[in-house]
Amino acid sequence: MICYVYKKFGYKFFGYKLFMLFRECLCFNLGKAARKLSRVTGEKVSKFGITTTQFFLLIALYEEEGITITNLAQKVALDKATLTGLLDRLERDSLIERRPDCRDRRVIRIHLKEKALRIKEEIQGLYNEINSRFLSIFSEEEKEIFESIISKIDNAEF
């Protein structure tokens, strides 16, 4: 769409008209909101020396210790290649370790190390605080509508 806009209107189009196009673009607006929430979250979690994505990985691992890489990738909606890089950094920082499954050595499970367990309560508390803060701007009805919209987008086949 942007390429079409550029070809049709050239650089003169950048400004108000482009703003109006973006204002109506669901993908742009969801991305913009997600970047804002991610930035705010990143500022909060930086004191632990982790990124926003690593923060959510730890939350998922606290919920299911010993999860397989495949299941973790599905849970956090990341491809295995991206997840592998993130896990490499968490392992380098002594927060997790990878261990082969005791029944099938081809399967790798992710386990939390002592360092991650020591900050578990703080991380989970911060997760609850951040989530509550973000949701506090919505009424109960708006929360239900928002969850319904996000669910529809998530489950839609495009």
Image: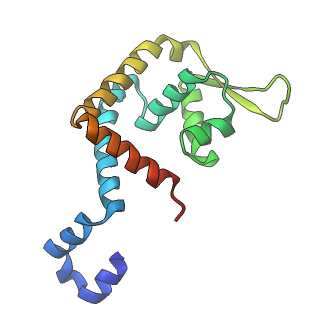
Question: In the rendered view, how is the structure colored?
Answer: rainbow
Image point (53%, 25%), residue name:
93
In depth, the one of 33 and 49 nearer the eye is 33
Quarter in which the N terminus is drawn: bottom left
Image point (66%, 37%), residue name:
71
- Among all residues in the image, which is located at the extreme front? 141
- Among all residues in the image, which is located at the extreme bottom? 8
> Which of the 4 quarters of the picture holds residue 107?
top right
In depth, the one of 28 and 114 nearer the eye is 28
Instruction: Residue 116: give x, y in percent of width and height.
Output: 52, 18
Instruction: Residue 46: give x, y in percent of width and height.
Output: 35, 29
> Which of the 4 quarters of the picture holds residue 106?
top right
Vertical placement of residue 1 versus 25, above or below? below
Image point (56%, 25%), residue name:
61
Instruction: Residue 121: give x, y in percent of width and height.
Output: 43, 13
Residue 102 located left or right of residue 93:
right
Residue 24 located left or right of residue 42:
left
Residue 34 located left or right of residue 88:
left
Instruction: Residue 27: give x, y in percent of width and height.
Output: 36, 61
Image point (74%, 32%), residue name:
108
Q: Is there any visible trace of residue 135 in the rendered image?
A: yes
